[in-house]
Image: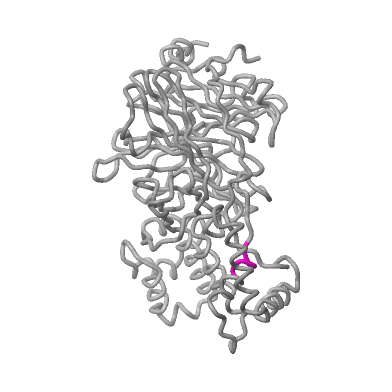
Amino acid sequence: MTGQDLAVRLGLTLSPDPRRVIIKLFVPGEDAAVARTRAAALIDRITLLDPHETGEMLRETLRRFGDRHHDLEATFLHHYDLVRYRVPRHVDLPPDARLLVGAYFSHEYAVEAAALCNPSMVAHPDQSGVLPGQLRVVISMRQIGEGHLSSIGFATALIGPGTDLTVADRSGPLAVGRRQSTHHRRDLLAAGLADEDWDNEVSATLLGSLPELFDDDDFEQAVAKLPADLLTRTTTHRTVEELRRATASDYAVGFPDDVPLDRRVLWPANAAESNGMEDARFVRVPGEDGEPCYRATYTAYDGRHISSRMLASDDFGRFEVTPLRGPAAANKGMALFPRLVGGRRLSLCRSDGETIGLTSLDRHNRWQRPVLLHAPANGWELIQVGNCGSPMETELGWLVLTHGVGPMRRYAIGALLLDLDEPHRVIATLPGTLLTPDETEREGYVPNVVYSCGGLLHGGALWLPYGASDARIGFAHVALDTLAEAMVSAGSG
């Protein structure tokens, strides 16, 4: 049905490592009706401990878990602060007791215990010490743990010369990005009003009183200044709450400089992504100052609904998160072009769930209704097609990796070529497949799947990281000349 795969596997595999753990807040009985009673009773029991016993238990806990986490005591204090309202007001806990309370309200979570999959690959911002023919790269990965919670993790690797590939050691304590102050963009908030159907007199008045960049205090001051005749409207409260929720969807997280990139974890940080951050597609783009920076689109999932989000970072140390708006952002699979084309910001998308489209960003920061690029045509993609990451610029055109779904929900990876100046034109297609699940890859968390969120061109070749059955990550390689020769002009059969 697909013939011989064109890409050649490199023989290296990244498998889920249950030792990669973070610390999450743990509230005993939080799913039960007596949650407050259980938590309060636990704190009461801790406060009754002898100070010597408290100190001994704390030291033993730090001994057992200290080398598994970055700045463990700071995490315990943070969790104590989250539950301290349950401590009786007349009780003044000493430092050891506060840390021990924080320890009891903490637990380890293995971020990739269930699966490791759906990688993308971009050039690393640091190329120091790289030998001729080599390139240091960043590999982003979807990590899946207990409860199917997805987060974003990283690895670093050296590719080249030839087909050499070495992935750096990923062991060591992980760190979750910490929230940092950020400014919200008025134009992005306005762009979301039509999507959420909250474009009315109240929202228009609030937007009119906000500066182009505003913080949470600016927003609350604007709410306080709403005219009395608007405050009496029955829809005002809901409109304000929806705008407050939309504003909260913008956030920033940062990591300490001494935490290596491969130990950094982007963990869900608001309600829209509470059940996962899925399938980040990273791409390197020119920044406003001309220096390279990074963008990634990903899918936020709250357990019922999905939405598209974008990560922006200069160096993988600080990440700013904003929602993507407009009809083209209504589904999964957004993938940004690495530069402007004809003065426009473009993206691939799969807004209808089964075809690949091309969309552009309008002056209102909304991704417009897409133009169709490719619909299911071959046997291996008749259920649906989508992109596998951002387009890659070549002399022949924009190389787009695709995924298709065939019988028995079997995934395969293919390719398209778009015109460099008119990317709405498909100029060539790969009639066969780049990669399909082999017998060693078909078993896993989701069987019979190969899937990538973005490859990389280096040394005259395509480097393709891919998830195998949503369980592990493999790598494949194909010479660009070989791929180009295998493609046929669009419409020539």
- Could you tell me which residue is drawn at 49 percent across and 18 percent down? 429
Q: Quadrant of residue 87?
A: bottom right
User: Camera-side residue: 292 or 414?
Assistant: 292
- Could you tell me which residue is drawn at 38 percent across and 43 percent down? 361
Q: Is residue 473 magenta?
A: no
In the figure, is residue 21 to the left or right of 195?
right
The image position of residue 404, as x and y in percent, is 59, 27
Q: Is residue 105 magenta?
A: yes
The image position of residue 476, as x and y in percent, is 52, 22
The image position of residue 2, as x and y in percent, is 62, 15
Q: Is residue 418 above or below residue 180?
A: above
Q: Say how the picture is coloured.
A: one colour
The image position of residue 472, as x and y in percent, is 61, 33
Q: Quadrant of the N terminus?
A: top right
**What secondary structure characterizes most of the magenta part?**
helix
Task: Spot the residue most to the bottom.
Answer: 90
- Residue range (magenta): 102-106
Q: Is residue 326 above or below residue 372?
A: below
Task: Spot the residue most to the right.
Answer: 33
What is the total number of numbered labels drawn onto the structure image? 0
Residue 487 visible within the image: yes
User: Camera-side residue: 193 or 322?
Assistant: 322
- Could you tell me which residue is drawn at 61 percent across and 12 percent down? 3
Residue 332 visible within the image: no
Q: Is residue 409 above or below residue 285?
A: above
User: Camera-side residue: 42 or 354?
Assistant: 42
User: Camera-side residue: 101 or 383?
Assistant: 101
- Could you tell me which residue is drawn at 44 percent across and 39 percent down? 282
